[in-house]
Amino acid sequence: MDWGTELWDQYDIIERHTQSGLELVEKYVKFVKERTEIEQNYAKQLRNLSKKYNNKRSNKDEPECRLSSYQSFLDILNEMNDYAGQRELIAENMMMNICIDLTKYLQELKQERKMYLMEAKKAQQSLESTYKQLDSSKKRFEREWREAERAAQYAEKTDQDINATKADVEKAKQQAHMRAHVAEECKNDYAAQLQKYNKEQNQFYFNDMPLIFNKMQDLDERRVRKLAQGYVLFSDTEKHVMPIIGKCLEGITKAGTNVNEKNDSMVVIEQNKSGFERPGDVEFEDYSQGINRASSDSSLGTPKGPMDLLGKNKSKNFWLFSKRSKLSPSTLPPFPTPPAPSPANGPPSPKFGRDPLSYCLKEINKTVKPRISSFRTLRRSPTVTEDFAHLPPEQRRKRLQQKLEEICKELQKEIDQSEALGKMKDVYEKNPQMGDPASLASQISQTSQNIERLRGEVNKYENWLAEAGGRGDTLRYKSHTFNNNGAHDVQSPDGAHSDESTPDPSQAIYAEFDDDFEDDELAAPIGKCTAMYNFPGASEGTISMQEGEVLAVVEEDKGDGWTRVRRTNGDEGYIPTSYVTIALNK
């Protein structure tokens, strides 16, 4: 069944139907365009989201980068970025395969439909023109026939009239005969026009218009078929990328299954293990023989346990296991004013003036601070040194080993380059036409210098590595090894730099001790040392010194690279053993 046969008289219906079909194509194209905009915006938001939470991916030195949970999160962000790329691909394919293709095809259909409508209009105009000619000839024939009839009647009347002359009769007959002849010609013309119109009408209704209608039916069917393909592409475009999207989702699932909590714990241990030994028991130091008791009930007794030495105050703030916030001077627990010492106990030390409590606290600090401060110092950020002495032993050994491997790789590269330059020089000497051997002299010299420099670096780091490995099991007071250059600032608990006028920072730890101490005899020096270099002594527990200064040795280096010394004014602290020459008493 076709439109030309069944809808031969429904020209207006066919015209409206085909126009409606083209409008449907336009509507679908607009729908797909809006869908592509949604996909593009969705992909853009996904990419921005991945970028927002992946801002540290370029920093491979971050400690958490080695954690499986962190790596899995980065994998998820990468998979989401790939997923966004697939959404962009969906939008791009829909735009290319549906929107652009259908828009182009729609323009072709519009032009073709316009041409068919023009052909139908032309055929209809031709038929209407023929009909007008037929109508005109018919009216002329009708008019002429009536005139011929009147002329015939007049001739007959004249012939019967006895008063009419023979000439009048002949004239009337001639006039009737002429009118009859004209009427016959109009009749023949009308018959011809009628035959012509019937032929054209038959051609119009049985050939021309059915052909045009069939062409428009074919056009509409092609439009529907193309639109159906667009519907299928709308689904197939997304189905085409579903395997890749599935892989992205599988990657996210794999990232979740790759998380290993035990491995993360081991990584944390490996990255942060200091190598220190736990602090030993605090030795009892009897000050009672050198102290006159004050009448006050608040006396500074012997510490009852390690938590007392670590400053376990009433607020339960233990800085080793809790976030250590900066305290303002007003928040520091006040020390009770000690009574004046008895003259029998001797003059107070020059460092603390007439404050025996400060002196006694310092004496306690001499015993416990190297062990306690090691943890405090771990929470600060000392200046990085070349030998990584600011790091704990385990981390220092790893960093030295890593640095040594890097230098060895660089050294091997320079050696290979030196060998290549040597071979090239030999080739130039044997074949001067290939090049001038003298032109390689500067490169060979520079390479040799680089090799010597790198070998020196290797030796230096090997010595440091051997030193770090040799003392790893004997270290006990690592707080003094974090910065051999003294770049670690001494700070009071409120964040201010300590000086001679401010109390020792460790006094805040012992805020609960309220007994009164008095001066005691200083430990006898075991030798002397002379400073070879300047040392600022900015780290907690250290003391500054100038090149050439002579200090008394109070405690020998126990293998951690630090020696305890005392000035003539009574100031004591630790200094790097490698910075001085020591002469012990025999």
Image (spheres, rainbow, N blue to C red):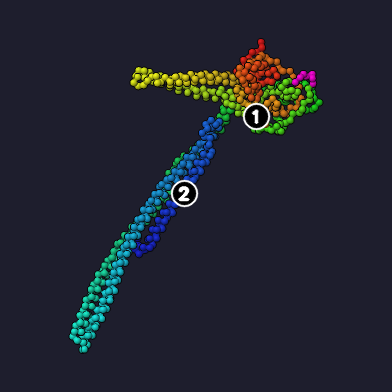
Residue visible at 32% across and 64% down in the picture: 124
Q: Residues within 10 Å of mark 1 (few under 14, many from 20)?
A: few
In the rendered structure, the answer to whether residue 133 lies left or right of residue 552 reads left
Q: Position of residue 447 (x, y in %)?
A: 45, 21
Q: Position of residue 165 (x, y in %)?
A: 19, 86
Q: Position of residue 446 (x, y in %)?
A: 45, 21
| Residue 269: quadrant of the picture | top right
Tag on residue 102? Answer: none
In the rendered image, residue 320 lying in the magenta stretch gets the answer no
Question: Image height check: is 426 above or below 164?
Answer: above
| Residue 568: quadrant of the picture | top right
Q: Residues within 10 Å of mark 2 (few under 14, many from 20)?
A: some
Sooner in the amino-acid sequence: mark 1 or mark 2: 2
Q: Which residue is mark 1?
A: 320
Q: Which residue is mark 2?
A: 35
The magenta stretch is 342-348
Q: Residue furthest right?
A: 295
Query: How many numbered dots are placed on residues in this image?
Result: 2
Give amino acid for label 1: Leu
Q: Nearer the viewer, residue 240 or 521?
A: 521
Give amino acid for label 2: Arg
